[in-house]
Amino acid sequence: MIIGERLKIVSNLQVMPDIYKIVLKARKFLPIKAGHFINISVNDPSKILKRPFCIYDYDKKTGLLTVCYQIKGKTSGTYNLSQQDGFLTSDFPLGNCFADFIGKHRNIALVGGGIGVFPLYLLKEEKDIDFSVFVGFKDKKTADALSADFKVFKKLSVITDEQGFVTDKFKADGKKFDAVFACGPKAMLKALKSLNLAIPVYASLEERMGCGIGGCITCVCNVGGKNLRVCKDGPIFNLAEVAFDE
Ligand SMILES: Cc1cc2nc3c(=O)[nH]c(=O)nc-3n(C[C@H](O)[C@H](O)[C@H](O)COP(=O)(O)OP(=O)(O)OC[C@H]3O[C@@H](n4cnc5c(N)ncnc54)[C@H](O)[C@@H]3O)c2cc1C
Ligand code: FES
């Protein structure tokens, strides 16, 4: 884990009115895998807390690390992550990763919704796995913008809300998989959980975070009857064990 490293901003491209893809220059050959996240701070002493974003892409040979971020509030909004001195201070890679759950699974479905598709993209680096990808977006414009990169996966189903929910599409597909990796809004994860699949479903969760490294318990959630920290024990958990607040 690298703490407090200043990463140079290489580019910051707008892909939707409120979504940007920022490329940062990190060290080469870091052990970064799909599902890991990065905690980023801006160059403003009044914004002490860093903000968590999943690592969308990482090129080991160049060290280029990509984050896709949606403008939400104080940090991502006001500062647009790029209006800095050309650098962003970051802790990374944090949390567990999907590779921790691959084990003997070779035929895996990826189910993602909205900006929840971001942590799934780096799974393109797991060349031995046969992935079937199901991604859902609220409308065609969003689907076109956010699913374009996912064409690297040979088996890709893109669905918009007008056509139905991504979980319905996944269910209707009816293929047998060894496991599911998922990320998306809570409603999507709840729908996926309610399918009661006979295979393991591993989902990346989002919680408000403080430290991002396990020290402040801001991010605890109930998994398997225990209070686990999403930042340190997750963010990926066995969905069957996650108790969502009703
Ligand atoms: C492990 C993890 C990975 C994430 N990956 C991404 C990513 O790849 N791309 C991306 O755009 N966002 C991602 N997020 C969400 C991102 O961290 C928040 O959008 C960001 O912290 C908002 O910061 P802010 O200062 O701009 O907003 P703030 O001013 O702090 O908050 C504004 C509003 O944003 C919402 N918000 C803030 N934090 C979260 C959160 N953790 N989850 C959901 N909603 C939140 C709340 O509605 C809040 O009222 C991730 C969160 C986690 C925990
Ligand atoms: S954010 Fe501090 S323990 Fe998770």
Image: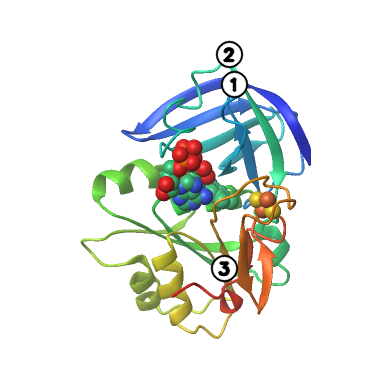
Quarter-of-image position of residue 23:
top right
Q: Say which residue label 3 marks.
A: 108
Residue wearing tag 1: 43
Of labels 3 and 1, earlier in sequence is 1
Provide residue 220's location: percent of width, then percent of height.
63, 62
Amino acid, disc 3: Ile
Q: Nearer the viewer, mark 3 or mark 2?
A: 2
Percent across and percent down for residue 17 are 31, 33
- Amino acid type at circle 2 is Asp
Which residue is pictured at 50% across the width and 22% down the height? Answer: 82
Furthest-left residue in this view:
162
Q: In this view, does 176 lie to the left or right of 163?
A: right
Q: Mark 1 and 2 residues: CB-CB less than 8 Å, in contact?
A: yes
The residue to which callout 2 is attached is: 85
- Residue at 61 percent across and 37 percent down: it is 49
Q: In this view, does 72 lie above or below 181?
A: above
Please name whichever residue, 40 or 109, is drawn nearer the observer in this view of the structure.
40
Task: Indicate the quadrant containing the C terminus: top left, top right, bottom left or bottom right.
Answer: bottom left
Left/right of residue 159 with respect to residue 21 in the rendered view: left
Query: Which one is earlier in the sequence, the residue at label 3 or at label 2?
Result: 2
In front: label 3 or label 1: 1
Q: Distance between the residues labelled 1 and 2?
A: 7 Å
Residue 82 visible in the picture: yes
Residue name at image x 58 percent, y 15 percent: 86
Q: Residues within 10 Å of mark 3 (few under 14, many from 20)?
A: some
